[in-house]
Image: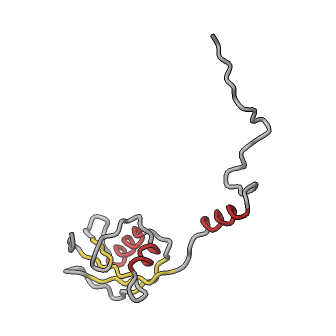
């Protein structure tokens, strides 16, 4: 026995092109446009050496707040002249090691001190 499938008639409807905001309510359009724009504000990051890590000549930098913390780690490696295989441990306020996918703005909003995000760095694990 063959069963006839009862599918709805969609011949008059079509999906909008990908990336198109046509047909969306204005408040949703505004939210999507806000989400798509990249945050270009800067955050002051202060680097502090811990243990036997070399001290940087300049320890204050302005970093784009929408960057992931991984970008801060890569920047620090570049400034110190360290290769990807060299050990580098980073901590926020001498307390915890943030995940590389945390955004700098979230870390700054949650853990800033005197308008700076303090990033401690070491060549060995300093805190558990």
In the image, taking residue 39 as reference, residue 91 lies left or right, namely left
In the image, taking residue 65 as reference, residue 76 lies left or right, namely left
Counting from the top left corner in percent of width and height, residue 125 is at 21, 71
Camera-nearest residue between 127 and 83: 127
> How many labels were placed on the picture?
0
Q: Quadrant of residue 57?
A: bottom left
Q: Quadrant of residue 98?
A: bottom left
Counting from the top left corner in percent of width and height, residue 4 is at 68, 19
In the image, taking residue 96 as reference, residue 27 lies left or right, namely right
Q: Residue at x 63, y 68 (%)?
A: 34
Q: Quick one: quadrant of the N terminus? A: top right
Q: Quick one: quadrant of the C terminus? A: bottom left
In the image, taking residue 111 as reference, residue 31 lies left or right, namely right
Task: Name the outermost residue toward the right.
Answer: 12
Q: Residue at x 72, y 32 (%)?
A: 8
Counting from the top left corner in percent of width and height, residue 92 is at 33, 76
Camera-nearest residue between 1 and 80: 1
Residue 106, relative to residue 60: is it above or below?
A: above
Residue 75, relative to residue 116: is it above or below?
A: above
Residue 47, relative to residue 30: is it above or below?
A: below
Q: Quadrant of residue 96?
A: bottom left
């Amino acid at each position: 026995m063959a069963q006839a499938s009862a599918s709805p008639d969609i011949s008059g409807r079509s999906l909008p092109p990908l990336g198109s905001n046509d047909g969306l309510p204005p408040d949703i359009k505004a939210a999507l446009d806000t989400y798509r724009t990249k945050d270009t504000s800067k955050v002051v990051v202060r680097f502090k050496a811990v243990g036997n890590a070399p001290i940087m000549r300049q320890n204050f930098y302005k970093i784009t707040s929408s960057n992931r913390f991984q970008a801060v780690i890569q920047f620090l490696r570049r400034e110190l002249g360290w290769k990807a295989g060299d050990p580098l441990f980073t901590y926020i306020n001498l307390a915890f090691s943030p995940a590389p996918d945390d955004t700098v703005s979230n870390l700054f909003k949650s853990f800033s001190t005197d308008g700076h995000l303090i990033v401690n760095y070491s060549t060995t694990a300093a805190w558990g």
